Image (tube, helix red, strand yellow):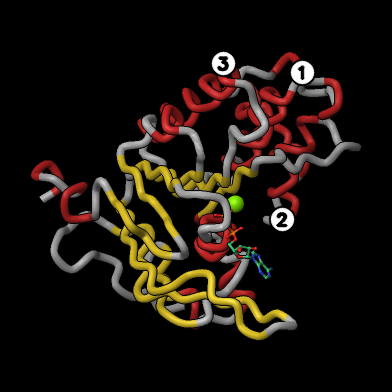
Amino acid sequence: MARVGRECSKRMQKSVIEVHHLYKAYQTAAGDFPVLKDVNLQVLAGDYVAIMGPSGSGKSTFMNILGCLDMPTAGSYVLDGYAVATMAADQVAKVRNQTIGFVFQGFNLLARASLLDNVALPLVYAGVSKEERHARARVLLEKVGLSKHMHSHPNQISGGQQQRVAIARALVNQPRLILADEPTGNLDSTTSEEIMAIFDSLNQEGITIVLVTHETDIAEHAKRQVRFLDGKIVQDTGSASSVAGSEYV
Ligand code: ADP
Ligand code: MG
């Protein structure tokens, strides 16, 4: 797999995400339904981006493309140096698994598995031994403050705790990018702040974070706010050139 554009052109700071002239239209019975219309975004390593915008503005569609769960109709997407929009599906899956951890609004945990097995699950696909899987999952459950509950099941813990488990699971492959679509959307404000504190500390450790939120106070945790309206980015408080300040040059 050849990497392209590993360094961004103007600065030496590495791009984790580079999206150029991205379009997405859904095919519906009534014809093509355009949702993303010429979206451009560069996210540098270590960035912390909150994507905002009204319901239906295309945020989840964009996140699904960033997460390689869906393909754009047109335009280019370079993820961690790989031009994923033009790569074969199995190669994309490999890049995705080694680069990205996902966190969803609905937690998406397996109800019948223990918290330990939920966190360890992505390592099954990576071919890691059971002993090693559980060892790594234990460390991450400890990191999110849930080691006491590791043998519990998701229905025995609160929503905030379930989201902590989902974050631990997202971290198990040591991703450099976390993508989170409304990760606090199902949580009360106190619990949301606790979850955001985890994202803040992961970003301080150097993990790049892109999350979607409706809430201004959640978005303020990020270093940069990007606003979608009708499938376009209409505001970006820190385009790559301003994010990559003098410390990076
Ligand atoms: P947001 O996350 O900002 O609420 P979405 O990306 O979920 O927005 O949706 C943007 C638009 O695309 C909406 O009008 C939605 O109805 C439409 N849409 C989303 N997914 C599909 C799909 N699979 N097929 C057709 N239309 C879709
Ligand atoms: Mg959405």
Tell me if the residue at label 1 has its CB under 8 Å from ligand 2: no
Q: In the image, residue 3 lies at what x, y percent?
A: 38, 74
Residue displayed at 70% across by 79% down: 28
Task: Give the mark nearer the N terminus: 3 vs 1.
Answer: 1
> Residue 121 lies in what quarter of the image?
top right
Q: Is residue 164 above or below residue 32?
A: above
> What is the residue that sits farthest to the bottom in this orientation?
31
Q: CA distance from mark 3 to mark 2?
A: 38 Å
Q: Which mark is residue 223?
A: none
- SS at mark 2 in the image: loop
Determine crowd level at label 3: few under 14, some 14-19, many 20+ residues with C-alpha closer than 10 A. few
Q: In the image, residue 104 lies at what x, y percent?
A: 64, 44
Residue displayed at 38% across by 44% down: 49
Pointer 1: what residue? 149
- Which of discs 3 and 1 lies nearer the camera? The answer is 3
Q: Which mark is residue 190?
A: 3
Tell me if the residue at label 2 has its CB under 8 Å from ligand 1: no
Q: Is residue 212 above or below residue 141?
A: below
**From the viewer's perspective, is 247 left or right of 238?**
left
Nearer to us in this view, 16 or 213: 213
Q: Amino acid at mark 3?
A: Thr
Q: CA distance from mark 1 to mark 2?
A: 25 Å
Residue displayed at 76% across by 38% down: 118
- Residue 48: in sight, yes or no? yes
- Residue 98: in sight, yes or no? no
Q: Amino acid at mark 1?
A: His
Pointer 2: what residue? 127
Tell me if the residue at label 3 has its CB under 8 Å from ligand 2: no
